[in-house]
Amino acid sequence: MNLQPRTIKRILTPLTGLLLLLAATLAAAEQLVENKDYVVHYSAFNSTHLTPEVASRYGLMRSRQRGVINIAVQRKQPGGTPKAVMAQLEGFTGQRGGSEIPLQFQVVEEGDAIYYLAEFRIHDGDRLDFDIKVKPTPQVPPLKVSFSQEFYTD
């Protein structure tokens, strides 16, 4: 198969953006939850940090008033690098004392990487609480991801 340079660029540009997004999630060591078998990495950010290509490819809206949460679930491997796994996610966001807004996660698979993205509305100075249950298998109790984060739109 003979791919033109333009076709290769069109394929690699969104993939590169997503891999950078995943790498940023994994690099934030304090943003993880784990048990003896699994590790859950998470990050939340303003959607303007996505490239236009990545946002378009996954149907995400780039806007100062939109946030994105990214979650990656990995199974620990004996003496090796953790392996990305599928999981069931259920979660909510909202301001303390306010109503809970359900997060609608979409799964993204890129090569060996699997991660989950969900959008939510933000306003300048919002401090949002996130509560997410991650269930890698039906037999395992869910890992609970709970955190608060402040967002700025300027």
Image (cartoon, rainbow, N blue to C red):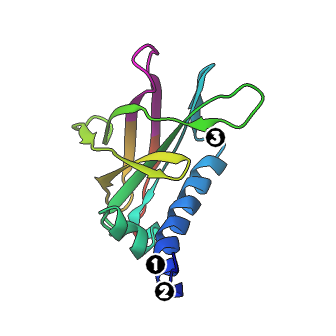
Find residue 56 and report its image quarter. bottom left
Tag 3: residue type?
Glu
**Magenta stretch containing residue 137, yes or no?**
yes
Tag 1: residue type?
Arg
Q: Mark 3 to mark 1: distance in Å?
A: 34 Å
Find residue 139 and report its image quarter. top left
Out of 146 and 38, give the one closest to the viewer: 38
Across and down, in percent, residue 103 comes to 29, 42
Q: Disc 3 designates what residue?
A: 30
The answer to whether mark 1 and mark 2 are in CB contact below 8 A is yes
Q: Residue at x 65, y 35 (%)?
A: 82
**Magenta stretch containing residue 26, yes or no?**
no
Magenta residues? 131-147
Q: Tell whether 24 sits left or right of 46.
A: right
Q: Residue at x 63, y 19 (%)?
A: 36
Tag 2: residue type?
Arg
Q: Disc 2 designates what residue?
A: 6
Out of 63 and 4, give the one closest to the viewer: 4
Please, what secondary structure does the residue beneath circle 1 have? Answer: helix
Q: Residue at x 61, y 55 (%)?
A: 23
Q: Mark 1 to mark 2: distance in Å?
A: 6 Å
Please, what secondary structure does the residue beneath circle 2 have? Answer: helix
Q: Quadrant of the C terminus?
A: bottom left
Q: Residue furthest left?
A: 99
Across and down, in percent, residue 61 comes to 30, 66
On residue 10, the disc is 1
Q: Residue furthest right?
A: 79
Q: Nearer the viewer, mark 3 or mark 1?
A: 1
Across and down, in percent, residue 31 comes to 58, 41
Q: Earlier in the sequence, mark 3 or mark 1?
A: 1
Find residue 74 and report its image quarter. top right
